[in-house]
Amino acid sequence: MEELLKQELQSSMAKATGHSSSRCISQNYNSCRGWVFVKVNHKSEAKKMFEGPRSNPK
């Protein structure tokens, strides 16, 4: 994930800052462009979870 973030953010570094539990699907990263919040879910139905917030931003 760090290498992908470095490429996408055009950053020389991306370092995970840790998360609160093993079931957590989000992770904070520090990059030279600032803090980044990443939401990850590898389950097959995860696409629905990501499309919801994108299609109905409030």
Image (spheres, rainbow, N blue to C red):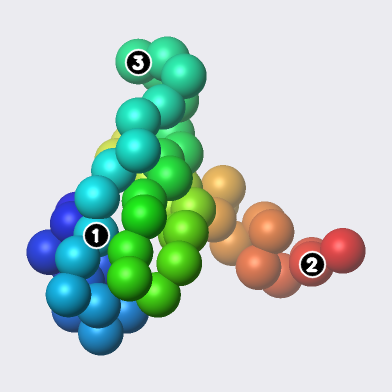
Mark earlier in primary sequence (3, 2): 3
Mark earlier in primary sequence (3, 1): 1
Q: Hey, what amino acid is under mark 3?
A: Ser
- Position above or below: 9 against 54: below
* In-image side of 56 versus 42 (left or right): right
The image quadrant of residue 46 is top left
Which percent across, then down, holds residue 27? 41, 41
Check if mark 3's residue and mark 1's residue have beta carbons within 8 Å.
no
Q: Is any part of residue 47 visible from this angle?
A: no
Mark earlier in primary sequence (2, 1): 1
Which type of secondary structure does the marked residue at label 2 adopt? loop
Which label belongs to residue 14? Answer: 1
Which percent across, then down, holds residue 55? 71, 70
Q: Hey, what amino acid is under mark 2?
A: Pro
Q: Hey, what amino acid is under mark 1?
A: Ala
- According to the picture, the residue beneath numbered tag 3 turns out to be 22
Give the Cα separation between the discs numbered 3 and 2: 27 Å
Check if mark 3's residue and mark 2's residue have beta carbons within 8 Å.
no
Q: Nearer the viewer, mark 2 or mark 1?
A: 1
- According to the picture, the residue beneath numbered tag 2 turns out to be 57
Which type of secondary structure does the marked residue at label 3 adopt? loop
| Nearer to me, 31 or 43 | 31
Which residue is painted at 46% across and 59% down in the image?
36
Which residue is painted at 33% across and 64% down in the image?
31
